Image (cartoon, helix red, strand yellow):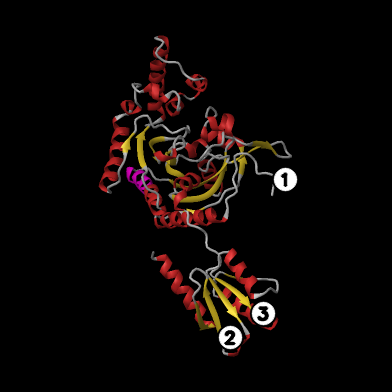
Amino acid sequence: MSAKFQRPRGTRDILPEEEKFRDGLIKKARRVLESYGYTFIITPTFEYAELFSRSIGTSTDIVEKEMFVFQDRGERVLALRPEGTASIIRAFLENQIHPPAKLAYVMNMFRAERPQRGRYREFWQIGAEALGIKDPLLDAEVIEMAVRILKEMGLENFQLEINSIGTPEEREIYKRTLLDYIEEKELMKELALCESCNRRKTTNILRILDCEIDAPKLYDAPVILEFLSRESYRYFEDVQSYLNSWGIEYTINPKLVRGLDYYTHTVFEIKVKELGAQDTVCGGGRYDRLVEELGGPATPAMGFAIGLDRVVVAMENAIPKLKGPFYFVATVGEVERGYGIRLLKKLRDWYIPSDMCYELKSLKAQLKIADRIGAQRTVIVGEDEIMRGKVRVRNMETGEEIEVDENELKAIYEKETSRNSTT
C-alpha cells in the first residue's frame, strides 16, 4: 500500500514499540532528575528568533543556517527552538523564578541539518539547567547526574570527556593564539582548511576544533588549558577531584570546546563510539553570563542535554517486542456477548490492558484476532462458564487452558507482570 503523503525529510514516525521504549527511558531520567531536586518545565515550541541569535551566537552554524525561521502575521521573526537552554533562561526571567532553581525538560527541537543516522531535523532532548549556583561541586554533580541517567537507561560502553574553556577573557587570548598557529601553518603550506573552517577563522574559530575534516590536522595546536588563569585551573581541578572521589571515569579532552558561544569554564560530552560520526549522546557545561546576556541579573548556571534519539539508536537492539493486550475477551454467542462486555469493563477498571472483537464473530475467528494482535491470554466466555460463574483462560503462547472465577483474573495479571518485572 503506497502512501499519497510522506513525512517531511529529516523527520520520523515513532512507532509503538519504540515509543513505549522511549517512554521508559524518559521515566528513568525523570526519576533521577527529581531525586536531585529538579522540577520539570515546558516552553513554547517557537520563540522570537533573536533569543537564539543572542544566546547561541550569530556566527554559529545553528543560527546561520540550521534554524527554521518564519514570520507571524505581525511580521515578527520567530524560530522553532533549536535547543532548550535559551528557552529555559527566557522562561526563568519572564516568570521571575527565584534562584537557585533546578529546572528540567523533555522537549522536541528542530534544526535544518543534513539528515543521517542519529541526526534528524526534529529531535528530542532530555535536559537539566541549574541556575544561581557557581561551585565546582555543582559542576561535578551535574556531570555525575548525566552519567547516572544514561546508566539507569541501560546504556553501556560510553565515554565521558571533560574540559575547561575558562572565562571569555581567557578564551579571547586563546583564540588569537590559535589563529596565529593556523595562519602560520597555512603560510608554510602545511594546512589547508575546508571552506566552512576558512569562514570560521573570522567568525567562530573554536568551531574548527569540532570539524570532522580539519580538527585531526590540528593535532599539535595549542590547547585552551594552557591559557587558563590560576583561579580557573583550580576550579577545574576541584571539579575533577569530586568526580574522582565518586568513582566517575573520564578523560580530559583539551580540544573539547562545544559549539555554542555561551559556555564558560566546565564543558563535557558523553560519547558512544559505535554511533560513528554522530557519537555524542549528551553534552553540556557551565554558562555564567548567559542570563545577563538575555537581560537578567548576573546568574551563574550549569546544564546539559541528552539526545534521546541517539540514545535509542545506541540501544536499538535492546528494544523489546511490543506485547498486545494482556487479556482478549472472546464470547461464544450473542447472549454471552453482554457478559463479555461487562467483564471487559471490569478488567479495564482494574487498569489491565484488555480488548475484544467488536463484531459478532465465531470463536475460531476471535482466537485468530487475539493471536494477530499479540494478546497474552484469551478469556473465553461461554454459556456453560456463565452458568457456573467461571471463565476459561487460554495462554496464547502455550495453548494451556485453566478455568477460574472472573475475580481471579486480576491476580493472574499481577502475578505475571510481577514475574516479568524481575526477569
For label 3, the SS is helix
Ranked by sequence position, the earlier of labels 1 and 2 is 1
Secondary structure mostly seen in magenta is helix
Q: Are marks 2 and 3 in contact (CB under 8 Å)?
A: no
Which segment is the magenta one?
136-144
Determine the image quadrant of residue 7: top right
Q: Is residue 346 magenta?
A: no
Tell me residue 69's x, y (percent).
Answer: 64, 35
Which label is found at residue 385? 2
The secondary structure type at the circle numbered 2 is: helix
Camera sees residue 98: no
Identify residue for label 3. Answer: 337
> Quick one: which residue is furthest to the right in this view?
73
Q: CA distance from mark 3 to mark 1?
A: 39 Å
Is residue 400 shown above or below 66?
below
Q: In the image, what residue type sits under mark 3? A: Arg
State the residue in front, 396 or 179.
396
